[in-house]
Image (tube, rainbow, N blue to C red):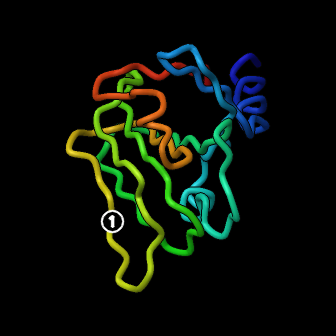
Amino acid sequence: MMVLAFVFLWSKVTHIRIFFPDGETIFADLVKTEEDRMRGLMFRKTLNEDQGMLFVFVSEGLYSFWMKNMNFAIDILWLDRQRRIVHLEREVPPCEKEPCPSYAPTLPAKYVLELKAGSIEKRKLKLYDRIEFIL
């Protein structure tokens, strides 16, 4: 019975608080389904400094992202299962024309966090910093 309750609660969660090493927090949209992964931040007009999008994968892998149908640049962090940054991309621009370039980590990741462009610099984030959140 406890497992069913957990699965039900997990399916209802749409936002999650993210804690950065500098003590600041944001709320991120939680992406769990393949359909939501494909859509990501496409077609959104803006992303505020206190917002983000967290992609959760079943296992670690070399997950690539592209910027098709994006309206603004973003920073992208790839996190391992311990939630340490294993790869980052700064100021990734929207795709202007096809084929859109893909951005992929050099090490396997279980989570990907998309942030407002400039967040990596502002928060002085670097490889192996730990990002905290509770799923």
Instruction: Give the x, y percent position of residue 24.
Output: 60, 20
Front residue (pair 43, 80): 43
Residue 19, how many percent across, how many down? Answer: 57, 20
Q: Position of residue 91 (x, y in %)?
A: 42, 53
Check disc 1 and give the amino acid type.
Ser
Towards the viewer: 134 or 76: 76
- Return the residue found at the far bottom: 98
Residue in view at x 72 percent, y 36 percent: 15
**Location of residue 31 with respect to 16 vertically, above or below:** below
Residue at horizontal 29 percent and vertical 33 percent from the top: 86
Quadrant of residue 125 within the rendered picture: top left
In the displayed structure, 83 sits above or below 67; it is: above
Q: Is the residue 46 above or below the residue 68 in the image?
A: above
Q: Quadrant of the C terminus?
A: top right
Q: Quadrant of the N terminus?
A: top right
Q: Position of residue 95 (x, y in %)?
A: 44, 74
- The residue that disc 1 covers is 102
User: Which of 94 and 118 lies nearest the eye of the viewer?
Assistant: 118
- Tell me: residue 25, above or below residue 72: above
Report the front residue among 95 and 55: 95
Task: Report how many numbered discs are placed on residues in the image.
Answer: 1
Determine which quarter of the picture holds residue 4.
top right
Q: Residue furthest left?
A: 106
**Looking at the image, which residue is at 56% across and 47% down?**
116
User: How many other residues sit within 10 Å of disc 1, few (<14), some (14-19) or many (≥20)?
Assistant: few
Relative horizontal placement of residue 100, taking residue 105 as reference (left or right)? right
Q: Residue at x 41, y 36 (%)?
A: 121
Horizontal arrangement in the rendering, residue 125 relative to residue 26 (left or right):
left
**Numbered disc 1: secondary structure:** strand
